Amino acid sequence: MSRKRPRSSEKSRPSVFWLLGGIVEPFTKYFARIRIHGAENIPAEGSFILAPNHYSEFDPLIVAVTVWDIGRAPRFLVKESLFRVPVLGWALKATGMIPVSRESTSSSAKSTLSGAERLATTGSSVIVYPEGTLTRDPLLWPMRGKTGAVRLAFESGAPLIPVAHWGVHEIMPRYGGKLRFWPPRKHVDFLVGEPIDLSDFAGRHHQPGALLEATDRLMNAITALLEELRDEKAPPVRWNPATHAQKETGRFES
């Protein structure tokens, strides 16, 4: 697995990311020694959608810092409630993050997709957790995905890039609530895969069956990357919270 930096870099352009990066990057790298593999799969310019696995409340910082190190500005879909938090809300707005409402109404979903699509069609990155929340799988494998990431890829035409990372649970366990300050700098491996080929969905991408099939393809790709990092096989059946009487939002008891 190789690491190559893109030729051009958003990091070289003045922006509010410089200010925040000067705070967030040293903080994150106190806890993590990040080893990046497959950075060449992230385009140097233009839009893309990044779809990572999600198993720790700390891993958005890992993803953001890694994307910034590669040379692109990270932009996430973020819970709408966080935009109302003083200072944090300002930072989220200033960096172009996209609010996501917890209300599952069609209008709120359409607004989120519209905001993300505007970014994805203007040369920006959009980071979408396809699971929608921390995985419920007891062994931290990716669980059933939701269709938001592939829906955005279909509507924007931006490449959909799977990502897996492993080691963040050593910094903050899932719903652990506390950071593990010692020993510092745990190893975190970050593997970027090749863009998902969605060309066979042309002309039928609005069909529910196509959205589910494409989402399954994405989750298979993320799982395969994670198998490579963990050097083990994932369970043959992906975890589905609905079959285990688990809520798909909020905290839960494992």
Image: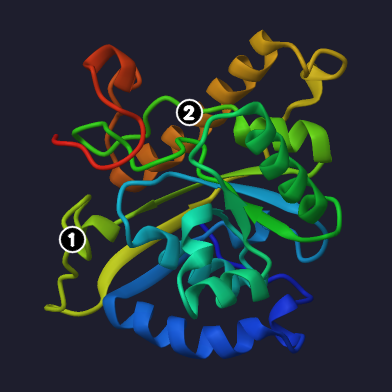
Q: Which image quadrant is residue 167 in?
A: bottom left
Mark 1, Cα crowd under 10 Å, few <14 / some 14-19 / many 20+, is few
Is residue 124 positioned above or below 142 on the image? Answer: below
Residue 69 visible: no
Please name the residue that numbered disc 2 is placed on: 145
Residue at the image point whose x is 54% and y is 61% from the top: 2
Is residue 184 positioned above or below 219 on the image? Answer: below
Please name whichever residue, 231 or 148, is drawn nearer the observer in this view of the structure: 148
Relative to 103, 26 lies left or right = left
Report the amino acid beneath label 2.
Gly
Q: Secondary structure at mark 2?
A: loop
Is residue 73 positioned above or below 25 on the image? Answer: above
Please name the residue that numbered disc 1 is placed on: 177
Q: Position of residue 54 (x, y in %)?
A: 39, 46
Relative to 243, 36 lies left or right = right
Please name whichever residue, 213 or 250, is drawn nearer the observer in this view of the structure: 250
Q: Position of residue 242 (x, y in %)?
A: 32, 16
